[in-house]
Image (spheres, rainbow, N blue to C red):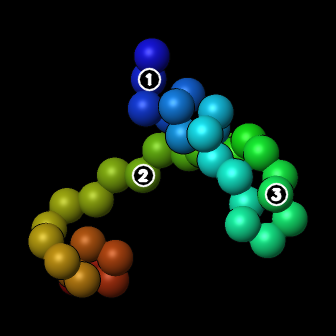
């Protein structure tokens, strides 16, 4: 089973108790904060 499938299956919102989730792929290079700031 893929990691995405496991996340979707086990996700639970702590606020409203909704189960299930939508997942998307994200790829980044670099380390630490530079990954998210694209520097």
Identify which residue is drawn at 60% across, 39% down: 10
Single out the mark in the foreground, 3 or 1.
3
Query: What's the mark number on residue 26?
Result: 2
Query: For residue 19, which quarter of the picture?
Result: top right
Q: Is residue 13 left or right of residue 24?
A: right
Q: Is residue 34 left or right of residue 12?
A: left
Distance CA(mark 2)–CA(mark 1): 15 Å
Identify which residue is drawn at 52% across, 31% down: 6
Picture layout, residue 7 above or below residue 18: above
Identify which residue is drawn at 24% across, 83% down: 33
Disc 3 designates what residue? 17
Indicate which disc, 3 or 2, sits on the residue closer to the N terminus. 3
Distance CA(mark 3)–CA(mark 2): 26 Å
Residue 34 in the image, given as x and y percentages of width and height: 21, 80
Indicate which disc, 3 or 1, sits on the residue closer to the N terminus. 1
Of 25 and 17, the residue lying toward us: 17
């Amino acid at each position: 089973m893929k990691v995405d499938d496991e996340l979707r299956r086990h996700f639970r919102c702590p606020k409203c108790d909704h189960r299930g989730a939508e997942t998307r792929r994200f790829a980044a290079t670099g380390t630490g904060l530079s990954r998210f700031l694209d520097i």
